[in-house]
Amino acid sequence: MLERLQLCYSPFLNRLQRLLGKRENLLSRNNQQETASINNYLAAVSDQSNTNNTEGSSETTRGTYSFFDFSDFYARVNKLKLAASPQGNDYFLAWLVGFLEGDGSFGARSKGNNGLTMGVNTGGLCYVEIVQDDVKLIHKIRSTLGFGTITQINKDGRKYWRYYTSKREFVLNFVALLNGNLVLEKRQIQFEEWVKKLNTCWNTQISIKPWNCAPSLDNAWLAGFIEADGCFYTNAGNNFRRGKLPSGEQRYGFFLKMHITQKGELSVLAAIRDLFGATTKINQVTNGHTKVKYNRVEITAYSSRNNIIDYFKKFSLLGKKKIDYQRWVRVHGYQERGLSLSEKSAKKLAKLIYKLSTD
């Protein structure tokens, strides 16, 4: 979930793989020397992108650049002649790939959980699903794709909506969409294992395309990924309190940040940080329930926040997280204007912030 225009450049990718180890857990390597190596890689890719031509054919070759390649997906949905179709909608598809990497699931199992080994004659089931509490977003995904089903599920007293498909032609649409276009290493590994099972179950011979793509400020992948796994935080929730003054009186002021948390994926988080011009260290956090450590990038600097705002002016969030983002932008604007706060004005402003919606 790392270069401009979603460029693909295998020699530099190979350098990164030699530095990090393609299947190693990046959490154990979170130190300044490693981060410097990642940044050197990203800078090299960026420099190369300014001096080489780009290619966008479906036959992505090593040692060349290309954009996200959705040509195989478009070819499939065109043949299906669906009532609705995202044909030619690169914006949505790049967003969807990013969103799926954060919140999607693709899997395979024996049909009916009968315990049989996956095979052509054992009734294997391959599927794609997305579970969300944002009903409008789920329906937007379904209506834009033109296939799949939506059901409501209840979990821990909360309502969720599930987009799902296990129909062969629709699952193969997702294979065509994701093959060669995934950014997160853990998702690439999952996809490779999924396609192996799919090939066994359906007696197909789908080959894996090179994984060369990376985040960029020039397509909607980041918007989809942040929609799924990003967070826009402000201290409006505690009425803009910011500690105590030397006199002991309550201090009021603005604090805001955007953060993304991932298990592993240090190089992706470092690249996102660099794209927005931030210099903050990537920290490790836990979820409070287990001892598992996650990597988190937090972007707080004023100039970096401006870069985030510039990006979302081009590639908007599509779900209800847009409300959080708009509140965040409003607080950013107040801070930009140097607005001073008292206890009374802080409470009033916080109420105004939380009344803001996208309607």
Image (cartoon, helix red, strand yellow):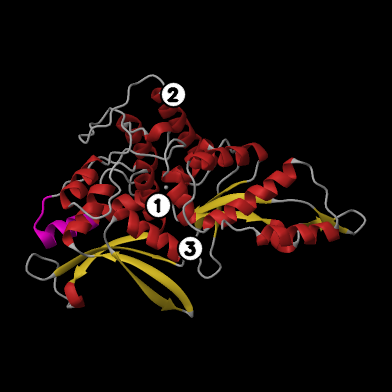
The answer to whether mark 2 and mark 3 are in CB contact below 8 A is: no
Q: Magenta segment, which residues?
A: 194-205
Q: Residue farthest to the left?
A: 121
Magenta segment main secondary structure: helix
Of labels 2 and 3, earlier in sequence is 2
- Mark 1 burial class by Cα count in 10 Å: few <14, some 14-19, many 20+: some
Label 1 vs 2, first from the N-terminus: 1
Return the residue at label 3: 292
> Residue 165's spot in the image, x, y percent?
25, 64
Amino acid type, residue under disc 1 in the picture: Asn
Residue at left offset 22%, top offset 52%: 173
Q: Secondary structure at mark 1?
A: loop
Residue at position x 64%, y 54% in the image: 327
Question: What number is the disc on residue 25?
Answer: 1
Q: Position of residue 283 (x, y in %)?
A: 57, 51
| 237 vs 24, nearest the viewer | 237
Quadrant of the rendered image containing residue 136: bottom left
- Residue 151: give x, y in percent of width and height: 34, 72
Residue of label 2: 47
Residue 302, by quadrant, is top right
Taking depth in this image into account, of 100 and 143 the one nearest to the observer is 143
Residue name at image x 64 percent, y 58 percent: 356
Distance of label 3 from label 1 (alpha carbons): 12 Å
Residue drawn at x 33%, y 61% as measured from the top left: 105
Amino acid type of the residue tagged 2 in the rendering: Asp
